[in-house]
Image (cartoon, rainbow, N blue to C red):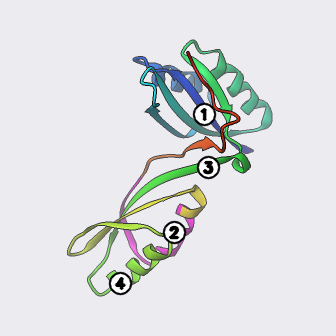
Amino acid sequence: MHTKVFQLLVDNTSGVLSRISGLFSRRGYNIDSITAGVTADERFTRITIVTHGDDDILDQIEKQVAKLIDVRDIKVLKPEESVYRELALIKIKCSPKDRQGVISIADIFRANIIDVGKESLIIELIGDQEKIKAFMDLLDGYEILELARTGMTGLIRGIDKVTYLD
């Protein structure tokens, strides 16, 4: 099983995300992560989908998605050619005496403390999935009360593979 990151440029129309995710569910493919947002040109939305499967399944996914009417461009974001990021918000149960230890771990990962309560902290961490996993592993001794992750988004490095749409 391999993981693949697809980046789609689609028409910014009502229901486009539903049609794309519907294709995955009809075919029995799993979406590990999906993010969407309007591009600099408001007519288009950039969608990043992370999925996994064997090579045949991943090739089939790419072909099926490319056939959808709203899809203007599809690229595979290869790790060596791309930048990936994800946002995680982590609420940790933390007494005042334990607070400095958590803050020290957050500082190492360049995470931000965005809320402090009497018995909790909310930490904002931005990075690739490996960075977020490593951070979570170091929080093993603390109780995570809530966790919210955005899913992965990314761009290909440089200007050679930029898609211009009319």
Amino acid, disc 2? Phe
Find the magenta span and give its range: 132-148
Mark closest to the chain's N terminus, 1 or 4: 1
Q: Nearer the viewer, residue 90 or 24?
A: 90
Mark closest to the chain's N terminus, 1 or 2: 1
Residue 70, position in %: x, y? 54, 15
Amino acid, disc 4? Gln
Q: Is residue 109 visible?
A: yes
Real-space CA distance between mark 3 and mark 1, rounded to the nearest whole angstrom: 12 Å
Residue 59, position in %: x, y? 75, 29
Q: Secondary structure at mark 1?
A: strand
Amino acid, disc 1? Gln
Residue 80 placement, left or right of 104: right
Which dot marks residue 7? 1
Residue shown at the point (40%, 83%) measured from the top left: 101
Q: Nearer the viewer, mark 1 or mark 2?
A: 1
Which dot marks residue 152? none
For the N terminus, give its image quadrant. Answer: top right
Amino acid, disc 3? Val
For the C terminus, give its image quadrant. Answer: top right
Residue bearing mark 4: 100
Residue bearing mark 3: 83
Residue bearing mark 2: 135
Residue 146, quarter of picture = bottom left
Q: Nearer the viewer, mark 2 or mark 3?
A: 3
Classed neighbour count for the residue bearing mark 3: other residues with Cα under 10 Å, few (<14), some (14–19), many (≥20): some
Q: Nearer the viewer, residue 82 or 134?
A: 82
Residue extending farthest to the right is 56
In this rendering, the answer to whether 123 lies above or below 83 is below
Q: Secondary structure at mark 2?
A: helix
Residue shown at the point (30%, 70%) measured from the top left: 121
